Image (cartoon, rainbow, N blue to C red):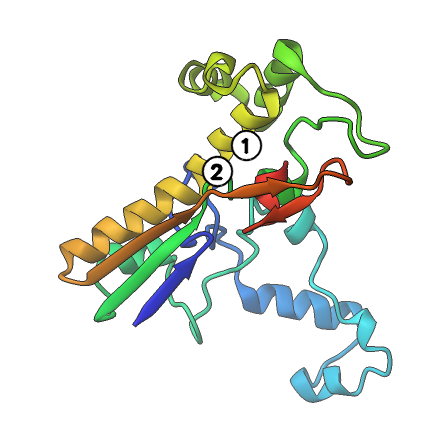
Amino acid sequence: KVALQSGPCLGGPPGRGWGPVTSVSPSAIAREVMAQLNVTSGIEGLRAVRDATRIQWPSRYMEDLDVAPYFSAYFPDDAVVRSPPADLWAAGAIHPRAMLVGGTSKDGTAAFYGTAPTLGNIAPDPAQLGDAAYETALKGAWGAAARAVRAHYPLSRFGGSAQAAFVQADADAYVLCPQTEAARMAVAAGVAVWHYEFSHFMPSPTAPGGGCDNGVELDV
């Protein structure tokens, strides 16, 4: 039995999906980390490093979206995942008897990476509101595809909120549609599938920008 919560690590925009997509070898990164620490004896050498805080994954793989887009710093590894998860699902190589899949209605990458326009309720965030802010945010996130994304997610569908429109487009692209794709592939392989979605949010009456939700993404 398998549960997929808040992203199945497959699908999404080509080359930018949430999950392992980069061709960089985990062993190559391990060698880079050990070279920076002057470690030559593998795991035993790393254990001998007195200050464990110095043993760090290279920051560019976690912070630079041009190097490793949206959580793709989780690499396929022959010891754990031999191929990108999407390839394994499509080939029927992941075959649970039953699967529970779901997430939150606004889940995605926008909150984690700070790419969504902000309301300005919490200092020092600026108030990025309206049409111009939405256009700028879309171009920054989607580049040449911004016009097509905007056509499908016009502000008129979201009460004029640049935040709501941007976050929904991001959530659909990186989590909600890919998890539905995973569910469909599982059904095609004869797997029993249950699907759910959390969408409730109760804003805080005293703390602007705060509240009780199923995931922080709901309060962007």
The residues bearing labels 2 and 1 have C-alpha atoms spaced at a distance of: 6 Å
| Mark 2 crowd level (few <14, some 14–19, many ≥20, 10 Å Cα) | many
Residue 207 is situated, as x and y percent measured from the top left of the image, at: 77, 40
> In this picture, is 80 found above or below 210?
below
- Label 2's element? helix
Please indicate whether residue 167 sits to the left or right of residue 45 in the image.
left
At a point 41% along the width and 37% down the height, the residue shown is: 14
Q: Can you identify the residue that label 2 sits on?
A: 171
Q: Amino acid at mark 2?
A: Ala
Residue to which mark 1 is pinned: 167
Q: Residue at x 86, y 32 (%)?
A: 124
Return the residue nearer the eye: 207 or 49.
207
The quadrant of the picture occupied by the C terminus is top right
In contact (CB < 8 Å): disc 2 and disc 1: yes
Quadrant in the picture for the N terminus:
bottom left
The spot of residue 96 in percent (x, y) is 25, 70
**Residue at (19% x, 62% y) in the render:** 192
